Structure formats: structure tokens, C-alpha cells
Image: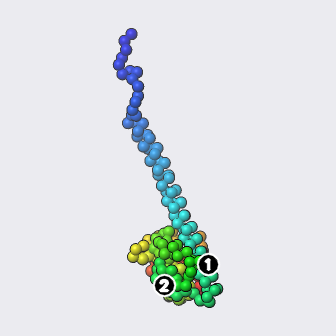
Amino acid sequence: MGHRPGRFRSRAAFTLLELMVAVSILSMIFLVAVPTYRRLQRKARTGAVVNDLRVFTSALQAHVQESGSWPAEVAAGVVPPGMTVAEFNHDNWTRPTPIGGHYDWEYNQLHGGVHIRAAIALTGTGDAPLPLDLDQLVDIDLAIDDGDLTTGNFRLGFGDCGLFIIEM
């Protein structure tokens, strides 16, 4: 009996079809994983902003209880005057927010024709612009308030910023 060369040779390489199937399977996994990852990132950013707003609000309200007045108005990213490090984590206030932009203490300001006595704004600055992502702002509003950016404690402020109202 004769031996045909190549008939029983070992397969040391993948065929083109096997590679195409593997790439297709990986592509499908990627298509499912990326939206899930983005949704989790968005939820984490929303939670971080909500937590920051609650912590800052508690510190500012404690300051009012001790001093008798709200801090004076300052620019975005600047710690409100009179807030000590013990009351207020300065690093968290001065860094860009988890959604971009900076925290901005608003005292006795008009926003869209409404007088706001005390609020924290999420606003853009030259070094950290706030991308206007209304869906992200609605997510924050749902976590804090009523999901409507025109009413309640969290609103769309003047200049398309997120505005968390502490006192009107």
C-alpha cells in the first residue's frame, strides 16, 4: 500500500474559516459588553455627583448653623469662603466633577429669572468644560429629585448648567 503525502499531515495552523468564526464571536461579545460598560460608567458618574452634592450641602448647612449665614459668592472651582477643611473636602470641590466642569457655589443669584438664595451649580470653565449631556443631568435629577429639569431641587440652570438648589 502506498502512502499519500499530505493525507495525514498534522494541522499546525488555523484555517481562514476558523479565524473568521473566532473574530465573529469576539465581535458579538464586544457589541454586548461595550454598551453595558458605558451604562455602568454613566451610573457611577451619576452616583458620584449625587454623593458630592449631598456631602457639600450638609457641610454648607452646618456652616450656616454655626456662623449664621451662607458663604459669599465665588467663581466656579473656588472653595466658598469660610469653609474649613474639617467641614469641607477642598480637593473634591476644586477638582473637575465626575461629569466634567466644576462645582460652583451660587449665593443670591438669578437663574432664569428665579432668585436662588443658595445653590451648587455644575458648570463649565475654560479648563474643564461641562459637556451638555441632558440625559446625564436627568439621571442626576432622578436620583435626587423628580426627573424633571424644570422643577424641583435639581434643575437646568442659566447657561445650561446643572443647578442643585439648597434654598430659594
Disc number at residue 124? none
Name the residue at the right extreme. 65
Q: Residue at x 50, y 68 (%)?
A: 98
What percent of the width, then of the height, locates residue 77? 47, 78
Name the image quarter holding residue 49.
Answer: bottom right
- Can you say whether 56 is above or below 44 in the image? below
Q: Amino acid at mark 1?
A: Ser
Q: Residue at x 48, y 69 (%)?
A: 99
Please tell me whether mark 2 sits on a helix, a strand or a loop: loop
Q: Amino acid at mark 2?
A: Val
Q: Residue at x 54, y 64 (%)?
A: 44
Q: CA distance from mark 2 to mark 1?
A: 19 Å
| Pointers 2 and 1 in contact (C-beta within 8 Å) | no
Name the residue at the top extreme. 1
First in sequence: mark 2 or mark 1?
1
Q: How is the image coloured?
A: rainbow
What percent of the width, then of the height, locates residue 165? 56, 81
**Circle count:** 2
Q: Quadrant of the C terminus?
A: bottom right
Residue matched to label 2? 74
- Can you say whether 41 is above or below 122 in the image? above
Disc number at residue 58? 1
How packed mark 2 is, by other alpha carbons closer than 10 Å (few <14, some 14-19, many 20 or more), is some
